[in-house]
Amino acid sequence: MLGNGVVGILSESTNKWERRVPLTPSHCAKLLHGGRGKTGVARIIVQPSTKRIHHDSLYEDVGCEISEDLSDCGLILGIKQPKLDMILPDRAYAFFSHTHKAQRENMPLLDKILAEKASLFDYELIVGDHGKRLLAFGKFAGRAGMVDFLHGLGQRYLSLGYSTPFLSLGASYMYSSLAAAKAAVISVGEEIATMGLPSGICPLVFVFTGSGNVSHGAQEIFKLLPHTPMDPCRLPEIFGKAKDPARPAKRVFQVYGCVVTSKDMVEPEEPSKFFDKADYYAHPEHYIPVFHEKIAPYASVIVNCMYWEKRFPQLLTTKQLQDLMSKDCPLVGVCDITCDIGGSLEIVNQTTSIDSPFFRYDPFQDSYHYDLDGEGVICSAVDILPTEFAKEASQHFGDILSQFIGSLISIPNIEELPLHLKRACIAHRGALTPLYEYIRRMQNSDVEDPSRNLEKVYPDKKKYTTLVSLSGHLFDQFLINEALDIIEAAGGSFHLVKCQVGQSTDAMSYSELEVGADDKEVLDRIIDSLTSIANPSVEDGFADITKNKISLKVGKFYENEVEKGYDMKKKNVILILGAGHVCRPAAEFLTSIGSFPSQQVLNSCLEAAFEEQNSIEVVVASLYLKDAEEIIQGIPSATAIQLDVMNHENLHFHISQLKKHLVTASYVDDSMSKLDEAAKVAGITILGEMGLDPGIDHMMAMKMINEAHKRNGKIRSFTSYCGGLPSPAAANNPLAYKFSWSPAGAIRAGRNPATYRYHGEIVRVNGDHLYDSASRIRLADLPAFALECLPNRNSLLYGELYGIENEASTVFRGTLRYEGFSGVMGALAKIGFFNTEALSTLNNGEKPTYRKALLQLLRLNDNNLDGLAMNEKEITERITTLGICQGEIAVRTAKTIMFLGFHESTEIPASCQSAFDITCLLMEKALVYSGTEQDMVLLHHEIEVDFRDGQPTENHRATLLEFGRTKDGNTTTAMALTVGIPAAVGALLLLANKIQVNGVIRPIMSEVYMPALQILEAYGFKLLEKIE
């Protein structure tokens, strides 16, 4: 039937609202009356439909036939996937099939196509020479979604007590055309411009995620309103101005729009790294989310238009939203145009419909409602938005599709088709075309299906294996086929570990393959060949190297033993989730229990013998197998597995029962506390805050306090100091500090307010004055350290936690730094180095340099100083003249500025938009540990104890001092040791049944802290105690 010149148009059956058509009557008229010699079309048969945007009679008027029977058609067109019984033998079909992504839910349709020996063209795969999809509805989804949300926004504000112009706007489908809907939005905008919006809902900030067609369509509607575009870094500024009581406004006559992309949503986990889009797509686990801190607190509406995969950090979790709303965040609603259920926005757990487009999430009750009244945030997640503008969407779509009909209908041999259509053919006459053979190959190797056990997945496990990570345009450029061909042609095997397909031609795809061979040399050749396609050259025949390049990362090589795996029946098994720095010390400690240096101490603490070497099996699980493999390298009795903990079925596959104890170094927050009752019912223990701070600090404090109470003592004063610092030898810069985490996070922490009790008085420190509140401190037992401390958040909570809130007149917790740190950081803050607003030097049309930025911050005119080198003396004098600081602090501040490189005439990267960005960038480069430099952890408690029987007041001191350890040229940081080892000790205590309390607990009870502290000392931690 292929090539017979007869076209069929399906009636859409998937959704009552689907009214779009692949070809309008006007398109059909041109095809029918243009002459078969020109268009290739002899007849068009249209299945009848009473809800299609164009009536059947309009198709009849231009010469189409109306009939349910499409058996005469060689080419059958639709929009959405048809029902399986609508697939006829030996026909060609064109619609959005989504089968090229090899997703299990779409495979029955592909199986039916192949079984009927039919052919399948997918609109999504028709790509032009520019690399962009030619057939898409993205902009219409954005337009309709934005109109619908503005319609609901008016109703929501009314329920909150505000009348707004949005109330007069209807839903998209209520307008006869897109032009009519836009006219209505313009009318709303005119009313805003003349009458204004209530100040109580302003500034009204719309945050758009993503920069593709969906986002452009939504912004197109938004820009019909009187608006001001905002750079993400300026959100705090505009929010601050609007809330300034000195500048009251009764009405506001504009809205604000802010477009954010991935660089605004995450930051590299490693402080020495910079955001790199390609690296983020390949290794999102190396980045931490910041959207909830930097963007969401200022958003009134989040318009979600971005593509998201589970391997990326979520844009906003439920817990983050709950925290934001408890702090009076202005967020009113979420417009999730992507309709990504359970995706980047965790609260969006359901789709909505065109006729019922909203639900309401109440973060205070953690509940969902289907009205627009009451507490919380309204959400829309309609999955068929373009059909609301069915007429314009169909016209746009048909304008392009009609150009391809002649080729599709008249050429039975796909080899004769134009290249863009040939590449869009997934199946031809019942067989996958060569470009899409990977679908079956990847299906057969898919280990993500938890219903398939490992023996079935790996029946031909090879002796030598390695993990290969491929990222790039694997599927739209079909480079995945070349990679798989190389593996199989060499006699190797592959198993799919992870696969994420980019949803547009701009988005890269990512796959992890376990590649194996029985001969080490064969595996080496496979890797060499894969490397060659990852690094193409013009000589190899690639005209566009960038487009055709694969990013290749190869893991460690492993020699597999027969039936290798971890035996849960023979050994105690501890599962470590994650592959961060703290995991390796924990894994090493646990697997060495059988040969522990102080075995007798260990056994006496645990009252259980772990004498057999390797009596504990450690399984390190990470989303990416290679990261877990790096953690366990060289550790006996340790196994690495790939595990996505968000995939519950996959998690259950590796954990035989759900009732398992949990140990974590994380804070016991509200969400964890809510698990207390459920944990008690299940008979399990969730031991939280089992790290350093919190963790060891709890245990040392409670040991001192309880010992004093046993002697009938009363705690008069409790002071605690803790800091992660460079060792004295590594404190080799003017700031005497180095970052083991993000400078941005550290600088923000320097603005946190603090509260403590001092001699019975509550002292509150404003975050803007935190550095000024630092005080000099000397520890009697460590007199060589010149230190200072800053108040650390809310100390009063610890008085309650330790049970001394009614007896201690002083409760203080501080962060330790080397002396002078706070003076320099405070001076930098006053000068403006931490300001987040845009720096004019960066946007004046000239190439900005660090030196020019420095001159602006120091309020110096660049005109007469351009050729003059800035030196330490000049900077010191200028700081003094500005009244920032004087003396030694001014000198150290100038030295720090020079050390960071602000005096250099190097061009500033375009990614920097503010002084804050520049400072963080330079700190990431200059203030990092290098080589085998050691960090240091110092924790010090002091309590003053009064006695009723006339005994003198006692001063009790407890100190932990730990340095990073270097072995075989590899350095483990003190921070990783003091966080990872306590967590491992907690696991041992649970394994030995030493902790009998169930529920959510902290290590503040003697059955935890007594044996834990003894084991930590036996391990080698230096815990010093003194009483005077």
Image (tube, rainbow, N blue to C red):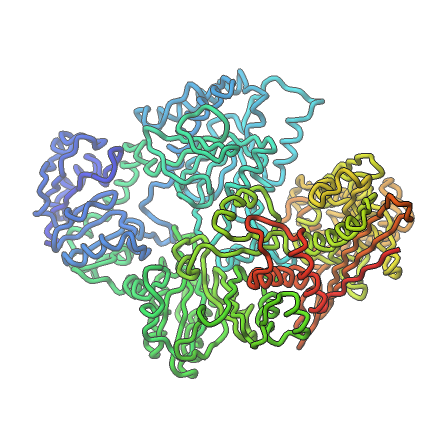
Side of 255 relative to 819 (left or right)? left
- Give x and y (percent) for residue 683: 50, 52
Point out residue 945 in the picture as x, y percentages from the top left corner: 84, 47
Q: Nearer the viewer, residue 644 or 857?
A: 644
Q: Residue furthest front?
A: 949
Whether residue 922 is visible here, answered yes or no, is no
Residue 795 locus on image (x, y percent): 74, 42
Number of marks in picture: 0
At 78% across and 41% down in the image, what residue appears? 770
Find residue 530 and report its image quarter: bottom left
Residue found at x 12% / y 31%? 61
The structure residue drawn at horizontal position 40% and vertical position 43%, both measured from the top left corner, is 340
Picture quarter with the C terminus = bottom right
Q: Is residue 999 left or right of residue 782?
A: left
x%, y% of residue 511? Answer: 41, 62
Residue 944 visible in the picture: yes
Q: At x 35% / y 28%, what residue is drawn?
A: 172
In the depicted structure, whether residue 780 falls above or below residue 515: above
Residue 576 drawn above or below residue 894: below
